[in-house]
Amino acid sequence: MLFRTWLQRLNALRRGPAFPGLQTVSGQLLARQAHFLVLDLETSGLDAKQHHIVSAGWVCINQLQLDLSDSFYSTLRPATDEARTLGQSAVIHGLHQADLAGGISESEFLREFLQAAAGRVLVCHHSAIESRFLQQAFKRQYQQSPALRFADTLALEQQRLQRQGQVVNNSALSLNQCLLRHGLPQVQAHNALEDAYGCALLLLSQIRARGHDLTIRALLNPHSV
């Protein structure tokens, strides 16, 4: 068993990086100059080892311009060798087994994601969920996961409110509550593309509120600046 693990690691080193397109964007880059991929995943539960991604959506921002021409949405169909259940997805996301059956495979989704994310800063609202589910998906398909770092609009909003001396509770940090505070239209919750779009609008408002000198490092580490 140890020999097999060692051999797998040796082969991985010989092959080089498995995800060359996911290069780290310089922390010194100004946010107004950056390109972002704003992502949302809808899942069948909260445990990434037991549950699965049922749909995914993203939109792109290029130098503070929202570009919907590169937007993406798809459901994910279950692998043929595993029995997946929707859990509460039919209630929460409005998705049914037929919706998943017409979707793309997990491996196809990851290929789409890798292509779209190349050279971009990843963004989510409450990124811990997306990060865990992406890592598990990559491990299933590639036996390893890239180091994924996200600008998290939830963390950015929490920091903004705390700087204003406000007491922040979890309900105040939902995507729609954040959009409401910024005077932005609310979105249909639990639709991956709608949530990604709302997150993108929120990010643009947060960046503009912070000024032209905001860097990617400050976006990625909101509580350290």
Image (spheres, rainbow, N blue to C red):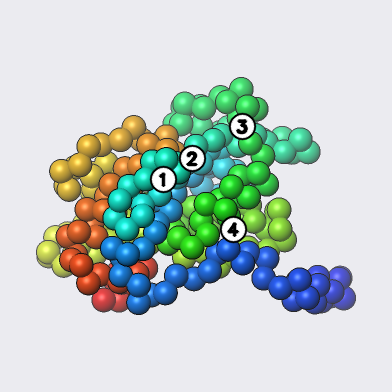
Total marks placed: 4
User: How far separated are the C-alphas under marks 4 and 1?
Assistant: 20 Å
User: How far separated are the C-alphas under marks 1 and 2?
Assistant: 7 Å
Q: Are marks 1 and 2 in contact (CB under 8 Å)?
A: yes
Residue 203 appears at what percent x and percent y?
29, 54
User: Label 4 is placed on what type of residue?
Assistant: Gln
**Left or right, 202 with reference to 59:** left
User: How far separated are the C-alphas under marks 3 and 4?
Assistant: 20 Å
**Left or right, 211 with reference to 83:** left
The mark nearer the N terminus, 2 or 4, is: 2
The mark nearer the N terminus, 1 or 2, is: 1
Name the residue: 58% across, 26% down: 99
**Left or right, 46 with reference to 211:** right
User: Label 3 is placed on what type of residue?
Assistant: Gly
Badge 1 density bin: few <14, some 14–19, many ≥20, Cα 10 Å: many
Badge 2 density bin: few <14, some 14–19, many ≥20, Cα 10 Å: some
Q: Which type of secondary structure does the marked residue at label 1 adopt?
A: strand
User: Residue 103 — which label?
Assistant: 3
For residue 25, above or below residue 84: below
Label 1 sits on residue: 59
The mark nearer the N terminus, 1 or 3, is: 1
User: Label 2 is placed on what type of residue?
Assistant: Phe
Label 4 sits on residue: 135
Residue 75 appears at what percent x and percent y?
56, 34
Label 2 sits on residue: 72
Mark 3 or 2: in front is: 2
Q: Which type of secondary structure does the marked residue at label 2 adopt?
A: strand
